[in-house]
Image: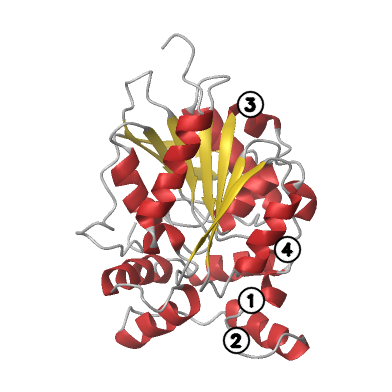
Amino acid sequence: MSRLTRVASGPYAPPVPARELTAVSADGARLHVEVHGAVDDATAPAVVLAHGWTCSTAFWAAQIRDLAADHRVIVYDQRGHGRSAASPVCSTDGLADDLEAVLAATLAPGEKAVLAGHSMGGMTLMAAAGRAGFREHAAAVLLCSTGSSRLVAESLVVPMRAGRPRTWLTKRILGSRAPLGPVTPLARRILKYGTMGPGSAPEMVEACARIVHACPRRVRYSWSKVLDLLDLDHAVRELAVPTAVVVGTADRLTPAVHARALVAALPRCVGVTELPGIGHMTPVEAPEQVTARIRELVSTYAVIKEGA
């Protein structure tokens, strides 16, 4: 689609998928899905990656490139993002419905996969934790740079003391209807400040800026309202599969307080990784560390399909 302005070369350029398909969610929403890597190898473990707010499948380019060598990597665009059509339904139930639709469309009955979600993608996994489709297919979970509630109140985007003024201003900034416009030097500086660590390389900032700026304004605003009211604390306690947590110590959008709360609430937490100096965009800012954590979960918990 014309709104896709992702980078065309380098490590953050999305690889060409081996297969593309459309998954249809419970309410009829149509979701763009890509399958990368060993699609015909029955012994290759499956990994499913769910991106965050204002992003797309392109966000996982580094993980796809690495994992596709010996995994079947499944990525999809959340509704309204990337190549998935916008929908009037924006809710955590909708996110869970969409994930179930993707799992059903790409995995065999009973087949297990490691599921990784970044930011809103992590919230997607939490929202789906009690669903039959999730429990059928989830071998283990990685939650990257995410939280289950109080996102606006705990955000550090506005450099003020915690309290009502900071929450009010943060809500206005994150929920702004203003267009982001083209990716300019100023736009890159703003995005880097709000979402990335101070040491982020220019190519990382460029890749993230192009992805975020490609998200339609109405989609960005609609999902900001969902995140503002997010309360998935109850769902975290239903996430019964082995779950690892990753967070950057310089994350302003979902600071480490969220990761620590998740660790305390998860029934089967198998470790938390705090990445020094890394911001909110962990899969882009620390691709090797995030990919290694996914590989570790696969090697420990993945189950090969029957008949392999």
Front residue of 53/114: it is 114
Q: Residues within 10 Å of mark 3 (few under 14, many from 20)?
A: some
| Residue in the image at 36% along x and 32% along y | 71
Residue 208 in the image: state x and y as whole percent: 37, 67
Quarter the N terminus occupies: bottom left
Q: Are marks 2 and 1 in contact (CB under 8 Å)?
A: yes
Front residue of 289/175: it is 289
SS class, disc 2: loop
Camera-side mark, 1 or 3: 1
Q: CA distance from mark 1 to mark 4?
A: 11 Å
The mark found on residue 158 in the picture is 2
Residue 6 in the image: state x and y as whole percent: 30, 62
Q: CA distance from mark 4 to mark 2?
A: 18 Å
Q: Amino acid at mark 1?
A: Ser
Q: Amino acid at mark 3?
A: Glu
Q: Amino acid at mark 4?
A: Ser
**What residue did someone put label 4 on?**
149
Q: Residues within 10 Å of mark 1 (few under 14, many from 20)?
A: many
Q: Residue furthest right?
A: 234
| Residue in the image at 77% along x and 55% along y | 233
